[in-house]
Image (cartoon, helix red, strand yellow):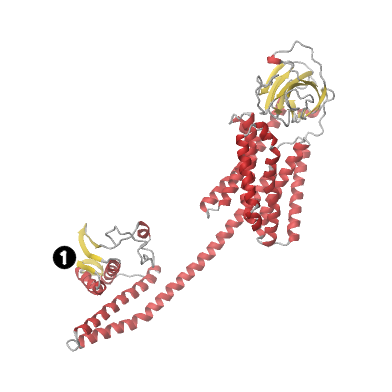
């Protein structure tokens, strides 16, 4: 937990730093002090800053509503007079609604630009967006277009893709810029909606290159976070939040490439309709994924009711974007933005509660939310007041860094906890081994005494006691020896872990050792139709082995075979292969499945007694 006052101080300082960086960027990269057009004329003579950066052609343009200077690409023979001046950038309005909507129609914009003929002769025009088609003419010559403006919906082709055109002047000081625009698809906006930029070719190329570079820097930074999110998901605990996080950042990348310079259009030839729909789909999906990230931090009553309602509305909105025509989709634009903003606005509140009450590390998520919302607020301000500014991706990059800090801090914390837990488990395992070793040592001496006494009594009283008592004494000796083998196994486990096992290699008889083990385990076959068979020939060559270890191994294998067999036979066989003695134990028991075979040699591993881990179609145990 973190104190409330500390959270407020950190958040306020962080927001102040974000705002300060944004204002500095706006101050140095905006063109707010550029000259503006007055009554259709922009005088740039003597404007030395033109060689430093491009400038927006804002101000009063001549406007010819319902008229095209160059229908079919040729100059009109009619004499056209403007209806007045129109502010650029802005959305036009046709009061008479000639096409059923005051934003539907076509028209011509004209601006006269005066320049110094002795300074530059190569210039460029950048048209960022015009709804829904446009074509640029310089001194009666077409130099670029997006879509095809026309006087009717049947003849025009909508497309809203930024484009740049360059042209050369020959000792001319006057530039007549004409832009024909037509819109029959967007019922909300029409005309030139963003500032058109003008400048010397080298200057304009430099500005555009810098703007594109900033977009690529942002996308690369976002892509790195997408990549590490997927990597942490694969190598970590498969937390679905990492997938939601990565997909949300992928939506931000797509939205970034579809906005501003719209670099995605260079790879995917979107139509006007699907270009706009794609943006809305990315916004809705991003809001949904953000909701999934913060859902578990909501109060239970919100999580059960409003969370489900939000997800349902998001699904309906997503489908509406896919199936409805573009005018209907644009009319629902406000709803789509509200659905995106709901988790964005709810996230700081939830994270503030979580930071102050649960986990102080959530401060990183809170700062990420503040940075993301600050970016959205500035986006709203820039679009509402039509402020021109070069792409500023740093708010979202900082948000991603804060997200990363949270995930990495959480990862390292879990890793440290795992190390501590592993150390605890190792210590517990060592204590268990020590305990078993101690118990084995303490039990072995009295057990051997019991075995020796039982064997002495059996030999001394032979012939004096009845057959049943003699057999009971023999079984007591055999059971004691079996327990002795188990205790030796426990002691050997400790020696194996400490690499203290030593072998006493001699020439041992595999046939004799097998017979001895079978005699020891024969009592286990009582009540079962099982035969223990030693198929190792009596003249089988002596094996170079530790007699005690070979006895131990055969005892364990035969004991396991008898334990998990109810009928049939358990056989021991041996053969010589390339100078090695190959000893095998076969039984008709229930066998082992693939999973059990994979862990059969793990310490203290044992199949379940009900045979759930075993399979009945195997002949090997």
Q: At 42% across and 72% down in the image, what residue appears?
A: 433
Residue 44 x/y as whole percent: 81, 24
Residue 319: in sight, yes or no?
A: yes
Q: As displayed, is residue 196 above or below residue 17?
A: above
Q: Which residue in the rendered view is the most extreme toward the top? A: 77
- Residue 103: quadrant of the picture: top right
Residue 372 x/y as whole percent: 69, 46
Give whichever of 239, 200 is nearer the camera.
239
Left or right of 551 on screen, residue 237: right
Within 10 Å of disc 1 (Cα), the crowding (few <14, some 14-19, many 20+) is: few
Left or right of 230 on screen, residue 620: left
Left or right of 87 on screen, residue 519: left
Residue 114: in sight, yes or no?
A: no
Q: At 27% across and 86% down in the image, what residue appears?
A: 453
Give whichever of 171, 509 is nearer the camera.
509
Number of dots carrying numbers: 1
Residue 541 x/y as whole percent: 18, 65
- Residue 62: quadrant of the picture: top right
Residue at image mark 1: 537
- Residue 1: quadrant of the picture: bottom right
Give whichever of 558, 469 is nearer the camera.
469
Q: Secondary structure at mark 1?
A: loop
Q: As displayed, is residue 106 above or below residue 511?
A: above
């Amino acid at each position: 937990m973190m104190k409330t006052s500390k959270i407020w101080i950190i958040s306020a300082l962080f927001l102040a730093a974000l705002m300060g960086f944004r204002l500095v960027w706006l101050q140095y990269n905006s063109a707010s002090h550029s000259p503006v057009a007055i009554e259709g004329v922009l005088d740039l003579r003597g404007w030395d800053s033109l060689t430093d950066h491009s400038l927006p052609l804002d101000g009063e343009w001549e406007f010819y509503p319902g008229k095209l200077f160059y229908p079919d690409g040729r100059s009109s023979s009619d004499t056209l007079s403007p209806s007045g001046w129109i502010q650029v950038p802005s959305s036009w309005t046709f009061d008479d609604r000639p096409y059923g909507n005051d934003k539907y129609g076509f028209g011509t914009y004209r601006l006269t630009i005066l320049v110094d003929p002795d300074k530059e002769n190569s210039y460029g025009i950048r048209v960022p967006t015009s709804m829904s088609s446009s074509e640029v003419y310089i001194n009666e010559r077409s130099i670029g277009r997006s879509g095809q403006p026309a006087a009717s919906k049947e003849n025009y082709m909508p497309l809203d893709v930024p484009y740049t055109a360059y042209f050369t002047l020959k000792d001319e000081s006057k530039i007549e810029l004409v832009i024909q625009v037509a819109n029959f698809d967007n019922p909300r906006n029409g005309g030139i909606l963003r500032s058109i930029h003008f400048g010397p070719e080298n200057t304009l190329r430099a500005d555009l290159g810098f703007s594109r570079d900033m977009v690529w820097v942002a996308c690369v930074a976002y892509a790195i976070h997408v990549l590490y999110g997927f990597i942490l998901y694969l190598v970590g605990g498969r937390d679905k939040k990492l997938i939601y996080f990565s997909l949300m950042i992928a939506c931000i990348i797509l939205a970034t490439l579809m906005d501003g310079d719209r670099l995605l259009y260079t790879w995917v030839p979107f139509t006007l309709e699907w270009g706009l729909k794609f943006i809305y789909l990315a916004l809705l999906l991003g809001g949904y994924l953000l909701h999934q990230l913060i859902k578990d931090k909501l109060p239970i009553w919100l999580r059960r009711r409003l969370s489900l309602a939000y997800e349902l509305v998001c699904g309906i909105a997503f489908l509406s974007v896919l199936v409805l025509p573009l005018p209907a989709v644009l009319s629902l634009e406000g709803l789509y933005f509200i659905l995106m903003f709901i988790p964005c606005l709810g996230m700081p509140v939830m994270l503030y509660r979580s930071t102050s009450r649960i986990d102080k590390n959530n401060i990183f998520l809170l700062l990420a939310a503040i940075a993301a919302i600050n970016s959205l607020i500035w986006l709203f301000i820039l679009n509402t007041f039509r402020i021109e500014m070069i792409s500023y991706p740093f708010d979202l990059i900082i948000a991603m860094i804060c997200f990363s800090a949270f995930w990495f801090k959480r990862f390292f914390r879990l890793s440290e906890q795992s190390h501590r837990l592993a150390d605890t488990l190792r210590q517990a395992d060592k204590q268990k081994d020590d305990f078993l070793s101690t118990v084995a040592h303490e039990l072995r001496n009295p057990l051997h005494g019991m075995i020796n006494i039982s064997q002495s009594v059996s030999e001394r009283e032979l012939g004096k006691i009845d057959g049943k008592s003699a057999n009971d004494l023999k079984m007591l000796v055999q059971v004691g020896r079996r327990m002795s083998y188990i205790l030796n196994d426990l002691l050997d486990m400790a020696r194996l872990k400490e690499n203290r096992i030593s072998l006493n290699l001699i020439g041992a008889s595999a046939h004799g050792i097998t017979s001895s083990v079978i005699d020891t385990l024969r009592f286990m076959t009582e009540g079962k139709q099982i035969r223990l068979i030693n198929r190792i020939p009596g003249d089988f060559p002596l094996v170079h082995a530790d007699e005690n270890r070979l006895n131990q191994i055969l005892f364990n294998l035969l004991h396991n075979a008898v334990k998990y067999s109810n009928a049939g036979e358990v056989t021991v066989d041996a053969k010589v292969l390339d100078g090695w003695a190959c000893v095998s134990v076969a039984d008709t028991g229930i066998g082992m499945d693939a999973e059990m075979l994979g862990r059969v040699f793990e310490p203290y591993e044992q199949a379940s007694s009900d045979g759930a881990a075993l399979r009945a179609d195997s002949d090997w145990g």
